[in-house]
Image: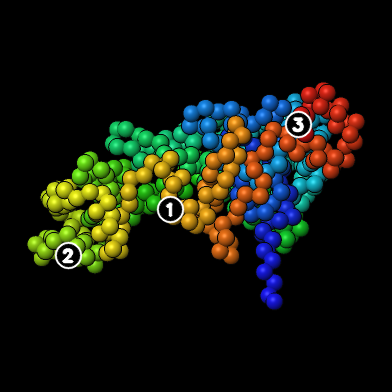
Amino acid sequence: MPDRTTPPLPYAGIRVVEFTHMVMGPTCGMLLGDLGAEVIKVEPIDGDATRRLLGSGAGFFPTFNRNKKSIALDLKKPEGVQAALRLIATADIVSENFKPGTMKKLGLDYESLKKLDPRLIYVSHKGFLPGPYDHRTALDEVVQMMGGLAYMTGRIGDPLRAGTSVNDIMGGMFGAIGAMAALRQREQTGEGCEVQSALFENNIFLVAQHMMQFAATGKAADPMPSRISAWAVYDVFTVRDGEQIFLAAVSDKQWTIFCKAFGLEEMLADPRLKTNNDRVLARDWMMPMLRSHLAGHSAAELAAVFEKNELPFAPITKPQDLFDDPHLNATGGLAPVRMNDGTESKVPLMPFTLGGERPGIRLQPPLLGEHGSALLREVGYSEDEIAALKQQHITTGD
């Protein structure tokens, strides 16, 4: 019979020790953990602050800290740093996202650690790559404002941050991609290296298309709400009972299908609307006609017609509605996860498959210090030494 054993995940056998908090650094570790790496999260004695955040940060910890082990260490004390160094000595990758200079003060910066292990890969997540801005304190919203993304997202005169932590999440992803590249490079050279990923540079990568639009046309890109769209029908429509739905017809073929589906033969025959570019130029008078024609339909009716005719459409969905999305649930896109208070929810998995499977959750987001004693034993601490570290509040947990 054929061997149906599930193949190992691609980074099984790689150990990551992360000194991270909030979103950017934890995203890097989560991605590597999802792909099989053993990720050890070194937390302060009172835990990662995202365990206690309210409001928009309430879901940070369970979202970005699955597939990790936790050890709590007081890095303000030499004994805590020594324990961290013992863990690092067993690692392939160290990941951190503290303010510039913090790791150097602890003796845990790349220059110090590479002297102990030239094969070590060190991933540093910062606000800015080295340069004139690198002393500044950055947040996702800060770089969105200074990097053009908030300008492009909001209306003219009303810059608006994007509706998620795009730079934090993508910055962590690029940190992980850099770590993967460094692992491959180490296979070739035998040497590790430092990987740097930054919020500002990530944001610039996101708005590059708008920069290059200016380079290509000589005209500045308008914010997305007031832009001249490349497509004629590409809008949110308010329809019966005040419902909203996004509808699109982005090619001449789709325009023909759309007009026939909704009895718009006169518009289809109008020479002023023959091509997509013609329709873009005619939007000022064309769109009110389309909105009026579709206003009496319900969103469900429009969705059914668009789906039947293979035209692009989308309901206007709130994040909480996605827990019940039939596609996500049917395709294994959501998995059970332990929340900060011990209850269970579902969390989105990585948006790709390996061999037809989404990388899943092997370890629930850890309790504070959940794996601390076992990890300390592994790096040579005796039971008495572990007890002494706990008594001195240098570590905690099981």
Residue at the location (62% across, 49% down)?
A: 361
Of residues 118 and 167, which is closer to you in this image? 167
Q: Nearer the viewer, residue 210 or 62?
A: 62
Q: Is residue 327 above or below residue 74?
A: below
Taking the image as drawn, is residue 113 in sight? yes
Q: Is residue 121 left or right of residue 345?
A: right
Sooner in the amino-acid sequence: mark 1 or mark 2: 2
Distance CA(mark 1)–CA(mark 2)? 30 Å
- Image quadrant assignment for residue 278: bottom left
**Can you give x and y, in whole percent of width and height, for residue 342 in the image?**
61, 34
Mark 1 vs mark 3, foreground winner is 1
- The residue that mark 2 highlights is 260
Residue that label 1 marks: 326
Q: Residues within 10 Å of mark 3 (few under 14, many from 20)?
A: some
Q: State which quarter of the image contains the N terminus.
A: bottom right
Residue on which disc 3 sits? 397
Sequence-wise first label, 3 or 2: 2
Question: Between residues 100 and 234, which one lies in front from this camera angle?
Answer: 234
Q: Amino acid at mark 2?
A: Lys
Q: Does dot 2 land on a helix, a strand or a loop?
A: helix
Q: Residue 224 occupies which quadrant of the picture?
A: top left
Number of the label disc, if any, that sits on residue 27: none
Instruction: Reply above or below: 283 against 367.
Output: below
In the rendered image of this protein, does residue 15 appear above or below residue 381?
Answer: below
Instruction: From the image, state whether disc 1 or disc 2 is nearer to you.
Output: 1
Looking at the image, tell me whether mark 1 or mark 3 is earlier in sequence order.
1
Mark 3: amino acid: Gly
Report the number of discs. Answer: 3
- Colour convention: rainbow
